[in-house]
Amino acid sequence: MKRTMLKKKSAKQIIRDSIWHRIAIARILFLVAKYGVALCEYCGRPSWGNELGNFDPHHIDRNRRNNTEDNCYICHRVCHSHITLNKLNVKQLGFEGVIKGGNDE
């Protein structure tokens, strides 16, 4: 599909995306302050290669218009795909990964 055929974002959507981006950064900074490293809230593992670009913000209630801190869940892109495709219900800090569960499988 050519770029010119793609639907342009509305001004409202650009604002929503900007707000969501700021919330995601705040959530990542919260995780760094709490654990000393940014963690995936799904698997509990840190970012790969120390790059925060490996994380995606996920809308917990799946409502893309609900851009609130309580609705933001930070996870790896692969974990985000798994959550979305399998329609999993998640909650903030609900992981049982390397930090909380102590297993590094």
Image (cartoon, helix red, strand yellow):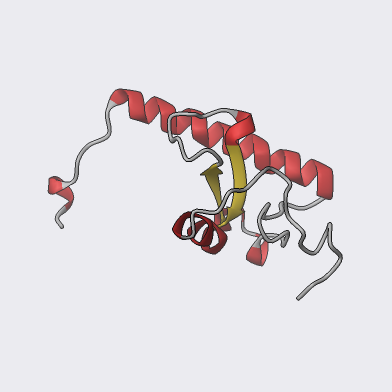
Q: Is residue 7 left or right of residue 101?
A: left
Residue 89 screen position, x and y as percent: 58, 48
Whether 72 is drawn above or below 46: the answer is above
**Total marks in image:** 0
Pick out the residue farthest to the right.
Answer: 102
Question: Which quadrant does the N terminus fall into?
Answer: bottom left
Question: Which quadrant does the C terminus fall into?
Answer: bottom right
Pick out the residue farthest to the bottom.
Answer: 105
Q: Is residue 92 left or right of residue 18?
A: right
Q: Is residue 11 left or right of residue 28?
A: left
Q: Nearer the viewer, residue 76 or 89?
A: 89
Q: Nearer the viewer, residue 39 or 71?
A: 71
Residue 2 screen position, x and y as percent: 14, 55
Task: Name which quarter of the figure residue 57 lies in.
Answer: top right
Whether 92 is drawn above or below 100: the answer is above
Q: Nearer the viewer, residue 12 or 53?
A: 12
Residue 54 screen position, x and y as percent: 56, 58
Residue for point 84% across, 62% down: 101
Residue 42 screen position, x and y as percent: 66, 56
Q: Is residue 102 left or right of residue 1?
A: right
Residue for point 51% across, 29% down: 67
Residue for point 35% across, 29% down: 13
